[in-house]
Image (cartoon, rainbow, N blue to C red):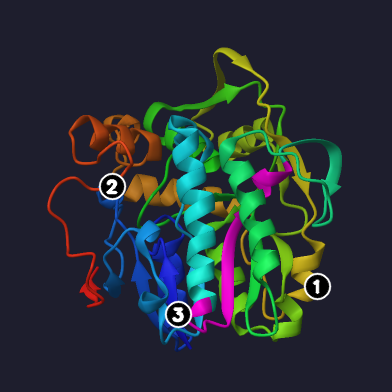
Amino acid sequence: MRILVTGHLGYIGVELTPVLRRLGHDVVGLDTDYFASGDFLAPPDDVPNLAMDMRDVTPEHLAGFDAVVHLAALSNDPLSDLNASLTYDINHAASVRLAEAAKAAGVSRFVFSSSCSLYGKAGDDELDEGAAFNPVTPYGESKVRVEQALSELADDDFSPVYLRNATAYGLSRRLRADVVVNNLVAHAVTTGKVMLQSDGTPWRPLVHVLDIAAAFAAALSAPRDAIHDRAFNVGRVGENYQIRDVAHLIAELAPECVVTYAEGAMPDIRDYRVDFTRIERELPGYEPQWTVRSGIEQLLAAYRDGGMTADGFTGPNYFRLRTITGLLDRGDLDPQLRWSRDRADTSSLELQPS
């Protein structure tokens, strides 16, 4: 299968790409590469890359592809809050245009990286895919809108599927430290403190980045009837945690560390639990391998072996908002988050090395 992966140089994308290649797929990337400074331990795989902005994709660019895996987005709530209108422009409008271009080009399968954040704030019940949407951020709202638009495009020739990722964690070569488990473990390794920014009571569904990659691979190979115009919460049954319990688990695995709370720590408005029964039962080939405990163990070893320092952790490289803000301040990006310095010729269809 010839697959275009948007956002292939991001936190998930750099780990998904080799999974797909090992399965024998012909993979091409598309990424503006905002986060090249975030390499940790090793660089991403070198794959052919359409070096262009997702907002500029036309059907011509997508001719010959069997599937599109759409990961690219302004990738978390603080970053989307930087400019809500840009979040809707990139995460919503451009995503819908990409899907329309894929359909026009004859691409038969469109795997959309959605998010459990579209459930927003909920009670203690575990939410399945039929639960009401209640997003509390522009990022979550953008995911709702794209799912709804893709459903309207679905027909006999175009099969979208919506993978609602839980909050990701785990080692990636394009590391993020602005996701909760990665962040807490980095605090522990670099300061000896597991620092909670909230009061620790909110619930989060959590999933390892490699289990996310496995879900996308399974969605690409599954029979059409199993995935057509369907949503799947991506995670593992039993992997919902209150944040304070994650913190105490880190302290258990790194007993030299203590759990602390930031001054003025308050409850987080994002508070929900998710049911992962459907994906484990109904997505052929999906078998999650990771738990939060094993992911913490992986991160502890990687941060220590990789020499993660307090300066490295608190710097801009592993935080999406800080990276984008730095690029804006230096003039490398214009206010629309387009590169303002010389880049590859994005009007060409010629593939560029990553």
* Highlighted magenta segment, given as a residue range: 104-119
Residue 118 shown left or right of residue 341 in the figure: right
* Residue position for label 3: 3
- Between circles 2 and 1, the one closer to the viewer is 2
Q: Amino acid at mark 3?
A: Ile
Q: Earlier in the sequence, mark 2 or mark 1?
A: 1
Q: Position of residue 257 (x, y in %)?
A: 50, 29
Q: Amino acid at mark 1?
A: Arg
Q: How many residues crowd mark 1 within 10 Å: few (<14), some (14–19), many (20+)?
A: few
For the residues labelled 2 and 1, say whether their Cβ atoms are less than 8 Å apart. no
Single out the residue that lies furthest toward the top: 264
Query: For residue 116: magenta?
Result: yes
User: Which quarter of the picture shows residue 284?
Assistant: bottom right
Q: Earlier in the sequence, mark 3 or mark 2?
A: 3
For the residues labelled 3 and 1, say whether their Cβ atoms are less than 8 Å apart. no
Q: Residue at x 30, y 41 (%)?
A: 317
* Residue position for label 1: 281
In the rendered image, the vertical position of residue 264 relative to residue 153, given as above or below: above
Query: For residue 216: magenta?
Result: no
Q: Residue at x 41, y 57 (%)?
A: 172
Q: Which residue occupies the foreground of this view, 221 or 2?
A: 2
Residue 245 shown left or right of residue 217 in the figure: right
